[in-house]
Image (cartoon, coloured by chain):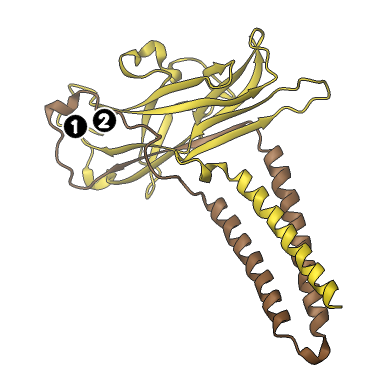
Amino acid sequence: MKAKRIITIALAVLMTAMFVVSVSAAQLTDVDPNGKTEVTAHINGNEPGEVSYIITIPDVVDFGELNIPPDDASDYDKDVTYLVEATEIDGLDPATQQISVYVKDQDANVNDDQKFYIANKENASIKFNYDVYRATGDNVNLSTMVNADNMFTKGYFLTGFKNEGDTLEGTLRFHQKQLYGENIADIAGDYSGYMVFFSAIEDI
Amino acid sequence: MKNCILKGMCIFFMLLSLFLTTFTLVSSAQSGSGGSTQVVARIEPETAQPTAASAQPSSTQSAADGLPIRTGEAMAWFAIIALIVSGIFVIVLRLKHADPSKR
């Protein structure tokens, strides 16, 4: 009787331990010290050599403190970088395929407003837009502006990854000029928005 | 009566662990092909006007800088794990303090 009891408890502990391991493996965002969100996709196929990949995107991109500019003569841009990485790619033929990554604002609509916004957490009607670039530094210009391209239902095309380890370092640019003339008391506070990423295997 | 309760609790936690393990594995496999990144900023009240020097693009801040972000979903999982482990400990302690005459 006692032996049965001990065996029962041991099985319960074993099942719990298996569960803990599984949850820990899934919580990759907490293990990664850079605070990244892993976008995981598995394309299941019956043929050998099925493609699987993991794209890593950042959890949070922080513009920091935004300021009302003294005039509207300049954009008073504030930039912050972000990194998207093809953490794992398996079974992909880089000669004919790529992992395409798209991005859009969480509320963007291909038939309506397509801009990227951050909104006041206290009053969502107060919002300001920012631009997304697929480059950094001196390469930030209209030709590398993601949201200058056509937007699809999946979002704006950001980049295509062909090899494991490929990265894209881009820039988010906030034009503080749009704060000019605003009443600080009305717009002060915390702002938040979401960039939604979508990935898919596409032929090139 | 006590043995029935203990057996029931053990079976419950075993089934719960099995269910959550399966659910986690299935969720991982069906995590889909999308995700989101939060973009945040802050406007301080009564902020000073930026100087002309800040008209130039400010120094970039890498998204890699900063502490790991723990989502609400992760905290919920931790709470469930803590609950299950606590339950196991309760069962073990009750068995240790069981009436010796009934062994």
Q: Earlier in the sequence, mark 2 or mark 1?
A: 1
Image label count = 2
Give coordinates of residue A105: x percent, y percent. Answer: 48, 31
B94 left or right of A68 in image: right
Question: What chain is colored yellow?
Answer: A
Task: Give the quadrant of the C terminus of chain B.
Answer: bottom right
Q: Where is mark 2, residue-wise?
A: A176
User: Mark 1 belongs to which amino acid?
Assistant: Pro
Q: Quadrant of residue A6?
A: bottom right
Give coordinates of residue A7: x percent, y percent. Answer: 81, 68
The residue at 53%/42% (across/down) is: A29
A5 relative to B71, above or below: below
Residues behind callouts 2 and 1 on a single chain = yes
The answer to whether mark 2 and mark 1 are in CB contact below 8 A is: yes
Q: Quadrant of residue A153?
A: top right
The residue at 56%/16% (across/down) is: A160
Question: What chain is colored brown?
Answer: B
B93 relative to A61, above or below: below
Residue farthest to the bottom, as pictured:
B101
Task: Answer yes or no: is residue A119 visible.
Answer: yes
Q: Secondary structure at mark 2?
A: helix
Disc 1 residue crowd, few under 14, some 14–19, many 20+, Cα 10 Å: many
Q: Where is mark 1, residue-wise?
A: A69
Q: Secondary structure at mark 1?
A: loop
Disc 2 residue crowd, few under 14, some 14–19, many 20+, Cα 10 Å: many
Give coordinates of residue B8: x percent, y percent. Answer: 80, 73
